[in-house]
Amino acid sequence: MMPLTLKTSKQYKAFLLLYILFSMSQCYAFESSEIEIYVHSTVPDKQYSLADVRAIFAMRTKHWSDGSKIRVFVLPDDAPLHRQFTKSKLNMFPHQFRRMWDRLIFSGTGQAPEEVESHDAMLKKIETIPGAIGYLKKQSINANIRIINYE
């Protein structure tokens, strides 16, 4: 195996840029594992699939298994936690969800999830609204919220 030799300044800069991007992606992957999907304590406790959770956040599933209304809460599209959540937990990109939500709105067949401005606002909504679902960085669970189980 030949050693890596960088003959020009451009090669060195390109190598350095790739190294930095790779390093950042490793940190990003670690942080994304700290995100969980939380629901209000009234949400039926059952095992959900990844497809179920995607359908909920895509606003295609509107009711829980007990018939109660699902209330979906998300952060703004450009929020780092939102990007991490959609990529790491739902294996989709934020713009894919935005496109689905816009299609529902413009066709008149549905609505987008309710957008909250911060992590604390998301926690407050999930704690106080029956049927609520959202995502947060891992934290201690209280009597009003729990982590949703899904595969």
Image (tube, rainbow, N blue to C red):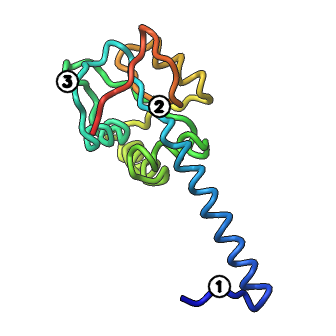
At a point 80% along the width and 85% down the height, the residue shown is 9
**Could you tell me how far apart the alpha carbons at marks 3 and 2 are, in whole angstroms?**
20 Å
* Dot 1 or dot 2, earlier in sequence: 1
Report the amino acid beneath label 1. Answer: Leu
Residue 32 is situated, as x and y percent measured from the top left of the image, at 51, 43
**Could you tell me how far apart the alpha carbons at marks 1 and 3 are, in whole angstroms?**
58 Å
Residue tagged 3: 65
Q: Is residue 77 above or below residue 134?
A: below
Report the amino acid beneath label 3. Answer: Ser
Q: Marks 1 and 2: which is nearer the front? A: 1
Location of the C terminus by quadrant is top left
In the image, 117: left or right of 46? Answer: right
Residue 45 is situated, as x and y percent measured from the top left of the image, at 25, 20
Residue 67 is situated, as x and y percent measured from the top left of the image, at 21, 20
At a point 35% along the width and 19% down the height, the residue shown is 131
Report the amino acid beneath label 2. Answer: Tyr
Residue 104 is situated, as x and y percent measured from the top left of the image, at 37, 44
Q: Marks 3 and 2: which is nearer the front? A: 2
Q: In the image, which disc is placed on residue 135? A: 2
* Nearer to the camera, 4 or 53: 4
Residue tagged 1: 4
* Nearer to the camera, 124 or 89: 89
In the image, 137: left or right of 4? Answer: left
* Dot 1 or dot 3, earlier in sequence: 1
At a point 26% along the width and 44% down the height, the residue shown is 51
Q: Secondary structure at mark 3?
A: loop
Picture quadrant where residue 130 is located:
top left
Q: Secondary structure at mark 2?
A: strand
